[in-house]
Image (tube, grey):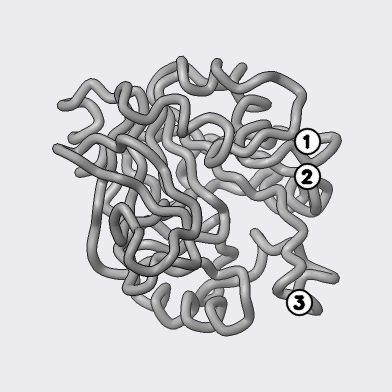
Amino acid sequence: MEAIILVGGLGTRLRPLTHTVPKPLLPLANVPMVERMVRNLPEVFDTAILAVNYGLDEMKTYFEGRDIGKKVIIVPEEKPLGTGGAMRNCIDHVTGTTAVFNGDVVTSADLNKMLEQHIRTKAKGTLALWEVEDPSRFGVVELKNGQILQFQEKPERGTELSNLINAGTYLLEPEVLEMIPPNQKISIERDIYPKVAGNGLYGFPFEGYFIDSGTPESYLEANFKSIGNNGTA
């Protein structure tokens, strides 16, 4: 099975660190964050597909000849394609159920349990979901009997459908990837998932921790969490 890791961003929030090193190659506890994600994939995922725009040459050089326990395929984006477009750009390397990760997420989500649920529910897509105290800064989901019925963007306090937000880890069937128009800049979150909501899109709430390591403060927190951690990232 394959896992797509979205590592195409510029890492602007982490400048000046990312002026010389692409964000995916910044270390978490002395291991580049993208390598840590690949190494921590469950055994059933034997191939990691890296969707790369910025820092393509550095990524190729880093992984060339390096054995990290998984096959690594680097798929270039000639221009930024957004989260959905980047996934669609990798479709030629996908053979079935595929995991997808935002490349700057450090999370305790158990991918093995998530995959068990995905198979049991015969889902088209399963999204890891994280509970927040204040959902007004995020896009939230309405979850009923495990299914995601709709999305709500930055709801006003008191109007939120739930406190559950998208945590940047997905399991998708090829038919979802095929819904994405090729060679276009597409947001999977805004343009595709709402079309699948209520029709085979499931949520996987989890506990533990969820860190978007894209800012200096959260990058530091992610380093502390990664020390001795064997989780997803």
Judging by the rendered image, the residue that carries numbered circle 3 is 17
Q: Where is residue 177 in the image (x, y as percent from the top left)?
A: 53, 22
Name the image quarter holding the C terminus.
bottom left
Sequence-wise first label, 1 or 2: 2
How far apart marks 3 and 2 lie (CA) works out to 18 Å
How far apart marks 1 and 2 lie (CA) works out to 5 Å
What element does badge 2 sit on?
Answer: loop
The amino acid on which the numbered mark 1 sits, given as a three-letter code, is: Glu
Judging by the rendered image, the residue that carries numbered circle 2 is 53
Judging by the rendered image, the residue that carries numbered circle 1 is 77
In the image, 27 versus 215, the foreground residue is 215
Labels 1 and 2 touching (C-beta < 8 A)? yes
Counting every numbered tag in the picture gives 3
Q: In this view, does 152 lie above or below 148?
A: below
Q: Position of residue 114 (x, y in %)?
A: 25, 42
* Viewer can see residue 76: yes
Sequence-wise first label, 3 or 2: 3
Labels 1 and 3 touching (C-beta < 8 A)? no
Q: What crowding class fits label 1: few (fewer than 14 Cα within 10 Å), some (14-19), or many (20 or more)?
A: some
The amino acid on which the numbered mark 3 sits, given as a three-letter code, is: Leu
